[in-house]
Image: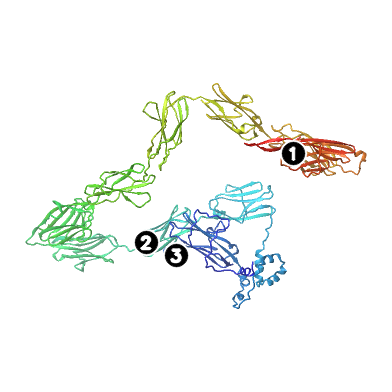
Amino acid sequence: MSINVGFQQFISVYTVSLTLPVEHVPGEEPQMSQISGLFVEKPQTVTAIKGKNVTFVAKVDSSQMLRKPTMKWLKGKWMDLGSKAGKHLQFKESYDRNTKIYTYELTIVKVVDGDAGGYRCEVTSKDKCDSCTFDISVEDAGEDAGELDFSGLLKKRKQKEEPEIDVDVWEILKNAKPCDYEKIAFQYGITDLRGLLKRLKKMKKVEPKKSDAFLKKLGPAYSVEKGKKIHLNVELSDPNAQVRWLRNGQEIKPSAKYIFESVGGIRKLTINKCTLADDAAYECVVGEEKSFTEVFVQEPPVTITKMLDDIHVVVGEKVEFEVEVSDEGANVKWMKDGVELSRDGKYRFKKDGTKHWLIINEATAEDIGTYYVYTSGGESKAELEVEEKELEVLQSIADLTLKAAEQAVFKCEVSDEKVTGKWFKDGVEVTPSNRIKMTHIGRTHKLVIDDVKPEDAGDYTFVPDGYALSLSAKLNFLGKRENQKPPKIHLDTTGSFVNKNTIIVVAGNKLRFDVDITGEPPPTVCWKKGDTVRACWQIVTYSHLMQSQQHIWISEAEGRVRVETRKNLSYFVIEGAERSDEGLYHITVTNPAGEDKADVMVKIVDVPDPPENVKCTAVGEDSASIQWDPPKFDGGVPVKGYLMERKKKGSSRWTRLNFDIYESTTYEAKKMIEGVLYEMRVFAVNGIGISQPSASSKPFMPIAPTSEPTRLTVEDVTDGTCALKWLPPERIGAGGIDGYIIEYCVEGATEWVQANETPVEKNSYRVRGLPVGEKMLFRVTAVNIAGRSPPAVMAQAVTIREIVERPKIRLPRQLRTKYIKRVGEKVNLVIPFQGKPRPVVTWLKDGAPLDTKLVNIRTSDVDTILFIRQAAREHSGQYTLSVQIENMEDKVTLEIQIVDKPGPPIAATVTDVWGFNAALEWKPPKDNGNCEITGYTIQKADLKTKEWFMVLEHNRRPSCTVSDLVMGNEYTFRVFSENICGMSDDAGISKNTAAITKTDYWPSEKDMCSSPKFITPLVDRSVIAGYSAAISCAVRGHPKPKIIWMKNKMIIGENPKYLMQNNQGVLTLNIRKPSLFDGGKYTCRAINDLGQDEVECKLEVRGMVKNLHHLQCVTLTMT
């Protein structure tokens, strides 16, 4: 590391403006199956000053998202910061509707040392995910003076360039003494000595204090979601130690919520169904030592699943903002223009499950604005617009024609009962008097004139206060006139009349009907449709809109249906004729001289209604049959035919199937793709035009039946049954296979009988109930949604008769040798057999019938099962299985051996003690565990300490020599027997002890001298070539005898292949990696002045010899 690089490490960065590459947290794998670049701006790594605030910004592009993305801020790998929001951690979220970019901010208020570390922000949206990491390092404010040498950095004079020295200064400092720090800093040009010392202090690792009680302590912190369970584990050095669990300093008692577990040295605390109350500090106490941790309970952020909708109302109407969240128990906050709303009488809050409402009973202009709803994981907003209520005229005033002394009543009704108004005559306000009265009751305003006089004639107007609206009517006074003529209607039956008094109009077109009227004085013209109140329309020529108790009057020059008048003419106009305008219209003209009437029939013709009940009735490989019902209304003109369209399900593109009109209501659509879902719709056509499309049919799929099944064969025949098997069809298609139908008939007949009621899914079936001795034919048909396939027919008839097959037992390979199990284990032997008809199966044990109380036997048509739930010693023996059909029989015998641990050896005795050695002998145990004894384990114990130590393991002989005993101690011995199940539970303890005496008396040479004598002989052995072996024996004699080893009577010299050892009379010959030529007879001879003795043994060396076909193990013996 160069000096310059080492110095630059002290410079801290306080602002971030560069985009750094995003790296995954080491050891962490992505959580989503698809990673996509969703971030527009990512948070950056920063070095913060302790006590200051720091803010991180992340921006996400949601233009390609169907739903609002979810943002998580994490510390490390798993700690969700969303549950820690408060004064220290603050989150902010905003959305720009123009750019469709979400902005997320994380602010850490007054940074502390604990905020340092790695952070990660993760954004998810359905199947998309993106994440980025950033780091925070915290430094004290006072460090800047030492770490930032601005005076040196700002000097503009040229520095003398020095060559970089590749020296690791930190390694030098860590290995140097503190008194040499200043000298090293001066040597390598480091001027910031204080910053250097602080940095060096941080680099030094502090060895954690080793705990005596804990092998593994609790982690520093754990995180768990609300409602889940968490496990806290510690491992103790003492498995028998008792622990106490504390929560916030209070001891926890075991319960259904808190479960304590102890397995060996591991102690586990399980907290079930964690709540926010479980967010606390926990301790595990063992004696005086403690292990601390902190559990953070994460409350899942509450998201908004249904956003607020903008609302537009008029003053006085009720307003309900509705939002739906992801959690039933969640709380939401309502705000208007940045101010939180509360229950103050004007606003009401309602909650039902996951739905929340904000209710305003009577909206006013003050309620206009933007309303927000906030949850812990999202927000939504909506606009409220309130308009002033328009005044509606429910009943207008009508023209009146009265005679002298009659009463004139002008009456109108408006929508608001609080509205007042004024009456005017010819533009002059009407003044009430004894003869003229004005009333206002509720929504009704009246002007009553008693004893009408000629001067009362004129135009009367009602003007509501505060509204730009006026209602007018005319009062006509009838007096005596000369030259009166009765009214007369002159209908012109030419032109638009198709026949007498009948007009046909195409829907949507304009109808204009001119009526010539004569009479003196000018008559009043009334238009009326129908005879009843429910369908009665009356139009008056010289009047404005008026409603009576029997008829509805329509304004003269206003609306879609109106009357226009000229001298001696009345025009009846319908703009955009509709179907409801059809009917019989009555014209009535009246004047003082009389009245006249005429009727006109208006017929509206239109395009027909759409066809109904479009459905698919049948499908083929590339076709489908479609059927529908004619339209309920043909438009007044007969339907000529139909047009059909189809599309693939999920597509929006419709394809026309016919361009010439199709007259029938059934159609076969062709050229479809098998296995694709389609939808159909139909148009009706008449002389006017084409109807709207019908509702789409239910999706259907063109599917063809499969080809016939293949390779139909007979698997088995019995008296009355026949088992068939086959293979699936070669061509299945998109419809798949729902099953198979099996049919049969007698040879020569033509009537096929179905064997199965419902299709079978397997490729085999046994037909039952067949006549014995008859020749039968069989066939199999595949079935799917398109129907049945062609049948697969049996080429030859099958005679229904039982086939005799000789019984044969197929004994599994593992049962051909002795089957060994331990006591208490489960025995489950499955032995298959064959034979027809079904054989008779018999089990014997040791030649006697099997006791079914001890052993369970289950037998089927093809196998028999011997089952023992818990094996015991009495289950051992020879089992004979017999399978018999009439006079034919097959037998097998299998031997089951149930073994157990052996008993202890008996009669363990110390037979001799000399020097520091002792000879020990014993007899095999009375109970060998029902198997061969494989060896013995010998242990010794000093009578002073009574602690047992291992001497020999896997000793095969019932005797041994124990060496290296300590002088002055007295020893006792115990022996364990071994077999394939393990060591015996109890040991055979020696009846006497071996005392290694300590005395100052030394016997004379004559007393000590003795000829050599082997107290432990050599034992014949068999070893494998290539594996080192050893043979040993024990000898005693004085003076110390000379030992000679011989092979095949030839003395073994200084051969490096052999290693000869003598340890206080225990003689061992080690043979390094013996070969086949090292086998033979080995002799050990001991010689001193008083005589000699020798022992010999035979050594077999087994080798692996390759045959041409397989490997075979053979034994070669060299003699």
Nearer the observer, 818 or 325: 818
Q: Element under label 1?
A: helix
Look at the picture and state if 506 lies above or below 843: below
Q: Is residue 497 left or right of residue 345?
A: left
Per the model, the C-alpha gap separating discs 2 and 3 is: 19 Å
Residue 910 shows in this picture: no
Which of the two labelled residues, at mark 1 and mark 3, occupies the earlier sequence position? 3
Question: Residue 331: horizontal and vertical position, in percent?
Answer: 47, 56
Q: Between 459 and 1070, which is closer to the camera in this rendering?
A: 1070
Name, please, the residue furthest toward the bottom.
157
| Tag 2 near tag 1, CB within 8 Å | no
Q: Which mark is residue 363?
A: 2
Is disc 1 in contact with disc 3, using a CB cutoff of under 8 Å? no
Q: Is residue 690 visible?
A: yes
Q: Nearer the viewer, mark 1 or mark 3?
A: 1
Q: Which residue is mark 3?
A: 338
What is the tally of numbered marks visible in this picture?
3
Quadrant of the image containing the C terminus: top right
Residue type for callout 3: Gly
The residues tagged by marks 2 and 1 sit, at their Cα atoms, a distance apart of 113 Å
**Quadrant location, the N terminus:** bottom right
Question: Hey, which residue is sitting farthest left in the picture?
Answer: 483
Where's residue 827, x and y in %? 61, 33
Cβ–Cβ under 8 Å for marks 2 and 3: no
Which is more N-terminal, label 1 or label 2?
Answer: 2
Residue 32 percent coordinates (x, y): 51, 54
Mark 1: amino acid: Phe
Kind of residue sitting beneath label 2: Ala
Q: Secondary structure at mark 2?
A: loop
Number of the front mark, 2 or 1: 1
Judge from the rendering whether residue 897 lies leftward or rightward of residue 606; answer left or right.
right
The numbered dot on residue 1077 is 1
